[in-house]
Each structure stands twice: as structure tokens, then as C-alpha cells.
């Protein structure tokens, strides 16, 4: 506990104390920062490991998964270590047969009927993904309270979309068509997915995750009324279960500017927004009494430092030094990002916001 509160001698908090303070809507010693998709992508160490192992081997081998998770903490000085885990992993125990290709997950037995839904299993998480929980325990032990351990899961809508489509899609028309035309099948699927996601996240917390982030990567394909009917009740159940543990939760959606108020209603201590809405406008909409995460356009990482710094300053200006801001990108790190840009950005955010 002493480590999480930081050093009285230096006046600086540890990364986990900084991160948790922002989640609790308190004023940390500096704005915490981490990046989505920081475990991998631009890391040279990641590229070296990928030459030896495929993604599933990396995620299913606790020692390798922990190594991947810790790399950005060691390389960039971020305040949180996000678990290196694909969002498809908990679906394997349900009986979903998938492979991870360059273009994304491909499912060989997509869910398209009530019989397909009935065939899905709900397994004990310790039995279905023990490697993920072991990796969290390793990361938590290695960090020794210095940085936050961020557990993750796909949101129920995003996972259901993948299960129905069977592959990545631009509009998820097959999934949405089933949702609209066969609501009973959709609800039955969402019931099972919600149960699995809830159990999965509670197991991550029990294993040592300090913070949880739910990724609703494809929620922007829905309008507000559809979200309220087909997604909101299920997401509320997941966040309500997390809240019972006292663990902070972050709710992230891509292209979800039209859904911000509904995302607040769904739950989460922090709402993570992408770059399609200005951070100050988004914060006013979700309520200044709630935390916000974001929202630098990831493309700025591919420019020069002066351009990137101007973008950083704009985000911080809009945050206006209010408590509850976690600096992040509006989505994941572009693969062509130079690692030095990430380290420079982390240092600049910390130095600019040091209190």
C-alpha cells in the first residue's frame, strides 16, 4: 500500500497511485498516461519475439505474455501495463473455433441460429483461460505496485459481432441484420457472452488487475435507440459486477460520439473517447464528475515531434487540469510509430502536468 501512495520524500506518486487517483476522480501528482496496443506494435522486442512465436503462443504462454505486457512499461515509462491478450481468447472456451490472421480474427463456426447459440458453453474461467490469469499474477508481482495492471475484455456487442460475422467487417451488416430480424437469438447470444465476459473480468481482478478496460470497438455502428435496446442492459450488468469489487473500470468505444451519454448510463468510472470528438466537449456531455480517457489522434505519432507536441498540448488544454483525466490515444498505436516518439510523449505529459 505504501508503494501505491508514492514517495513522501520525492512528492511523486507511483504509476499505480497516479492511475487509480485519476480513476477515483482525484488529483494525481501528474496526469497518468498509457497507450492502447502498447504491448507490441512498435516495440523492437515485440518484433523479435514475433519472429519466433505466433500471437496465440505469445498470449497463451504466461511468461511470454507477461514479458510482452511489461515491455512498454520498461521502454516508455507508462503508468499502466495493459495485458497482452486478444479479446477473442475467452470465446475459445465457449466452443468458438478461431484463428488470428493479419486482417484480424477469423471464426470457423460463426453463430447464426438459435441452435448455434444453444451449443455455446459457459466454462469455468480458471479452466478455459488459466494462462491469462497466470500472466496477470506474474505482471502484478513483477511491477510490485509501481504501475497499474490493466485487465481487458472485448465488450459484449463487439464479441457478438465477431461471432456472427465470422471475420472483421466494415459495417457488421450480417450481425446487425440478425440483431434486428431475430432479436430472440440476439438476446440469447448476448446473455451468454455477458456471462462469460463478467466471469472473465472478475477472474482478472482476482488475479491482480488494478483496473479494467472494456473495449467496444464496433459500437459506433449503432445509433442510440439500437444501443439502448440491444446492448445497454448487458453492458450495465458487466459494469455493475465490476463495481461490486471496488475495482475501477474504463469504458471505451470507437466512433461512439453519438452514444456518450448512453455509455455513461451503461457504466464505468472513466469513459474513454476517441479523437472524433473534442475532449472538453465529451467531458461536458458525460459529466465533469466522471473521469475521462483520451484522446490524441494516433496518426499524430507518425508526424514530427513539434506536430505531436501541439496535439498533446491541445488535449491537455481541453482537460484543463481537472481531476480524472487519463491521457491516451483515441485508439491504438499505429504500427509504423517510432518508439522514441512514445517515450518522448510520456515524458512530456508527465513534465507538463506535474503538480
Image: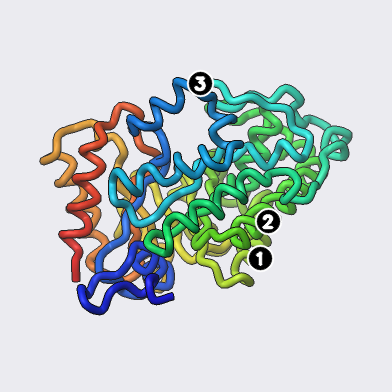
Residue position for label 3: 102
Contact check, label 1 and label 2, Cβ < 8 Å: yes
Residue position for label 1: 241
**Position above or below: 337 against 121:** above
Question: In which image quadrant can residue 20 be found?
Answer: bottom left
**Position above or below: 281 against 217:** below
Left or right relative to 345: residue 232: right
Residue 128 x %, y %: 73, 43
For the question of whether residue 220 can be seen, the reply is no
Precedes in sequence: disc 1 or disc 2: 2
Quarter holding the N terminus is bottom left
- The residue that appears at 31% across and 38% down in the rendered structure is 298
Q: Which of the numbered marks, if any, corresponds to residue 198?
A: 2
Question: In which image quadrant can residue 223 be found?
Answer: top right
Precedes in sequence: disc 3 or disc 1: 3
Contact check, label 3 and label 1, Cβ < 8 Å: no
Q: What element carries label 3?
A: loop
Q: Callout 2 environment at 10 Å: few (<14), some (14 to 19), or many (20+)? A: many
- The residue that appears at 37% across and 62% down in the rendered structure is 146
Residue farthest to the bottom, as pictured: 8
Of the pair 92 and 331, the residue shown nearer to us:
92
Contact check, label 3 and label 2, Cβ < 8 Å: no
CA separation, marks 1 and 2?
A: 7 Å
Amino acid at each position: 500500500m505504501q508503494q501505491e501512495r508514492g514517495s513522501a520524500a520525492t512528492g511523486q506518486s507511483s504509476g499505480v497511485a497516479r492511475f487509480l487517483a485519476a480513476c477515483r476522480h482525484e488529483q494525481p501528482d501528474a496526469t497518468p498516461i498509457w497507450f492502447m496496443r502498447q504491448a507490441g506494435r512498435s516495440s523492437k522486442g515485440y518484433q523479435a519475439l514475433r519472429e519466433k512465436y505466433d500471437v496465440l503462443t505469445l498470449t497463451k504462454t504466461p511468461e511470454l505474455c507477461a514479458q510482452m505486457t511489461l515491455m512498454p512499461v520498461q521502454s516508455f515509462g507508462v503508468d499502466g501495463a495493459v495485458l497482452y491478450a486478444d479479446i477473442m481468447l475467452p470465446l475459445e472456451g465457449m466452443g468458438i473455433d478461431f484463428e488470428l490472421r493479419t486482417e484480424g480474427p477469423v471464426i470457423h463456426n460463426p453463430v447464426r441460429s438459435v441452435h448455434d447459440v444453444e451449443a455455446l458453453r459457459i466454462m469455468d474461467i480458471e479452466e478455459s483461460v488459466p494462462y491469462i490469469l497466470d500472466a496477470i499474477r506474474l505482471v502484478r508481482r513483477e511491477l510490485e505496485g509501481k504501475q497499474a495492471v490493466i485487465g481487458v475484455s472485448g465488450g459484449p456487442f463487439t464479441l457478438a459481432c465477431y461471432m456472427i460475422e465470422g471475420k472483421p467487417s466494415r459495417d457488421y451488416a450480417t450481425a446487425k441484420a440478425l440483431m434486428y430480424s431475430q432479436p430472440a437469438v440476439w438476446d440469447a447470444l448476448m446473455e451468454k457472452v455477458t456471462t462469460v465476459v463478467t466471469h472473465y473480468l472478475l477472474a482478472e481482478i482476482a488475479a491482480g488487475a488494478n483496473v479494467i478496460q472494456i473495449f467496444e470497438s464496433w459500437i459506433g455502428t449503432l445509433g442510440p435507440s439500437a444501443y439502448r435496446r440491444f446492448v445497454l442492459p448487458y453492458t450495465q450488468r458487466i459494469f455493475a459486477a465490476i463495481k461490486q469489487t471496488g475495482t475501477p473500470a474504463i469504458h471505451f468505444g470507437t466512433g461512439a460520439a453519438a452514444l456518450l451519454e448512453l455509455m455513461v448510463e451503461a457504466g464505468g468510472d472513466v469513459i474513454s473517447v476517441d479523437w472524433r470528438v473534442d475532449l472538453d466537449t465529451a467531458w461536458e456531455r458525460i459529466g465533469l464528475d466522471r473521469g475521462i480517457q483520451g484522446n490524441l489522434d494516433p496518426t499524430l505519432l507518425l508526424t514530427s515531434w513539434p506536430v505531436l507536441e501541439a496535439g498533446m498540448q491541445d488535449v491537455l488544454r481541453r482537460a484543463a487540469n481537472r481531476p480524472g483525466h487519463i491521457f491516451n490515444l483515441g485508439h491504438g498505436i499505429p504500427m509504423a510509430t517510432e518508439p522514441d516518439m512514445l517515450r518522448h510523449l510520456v515524458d512530456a505529459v508527465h513534465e507538463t502536468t506535474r503538480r
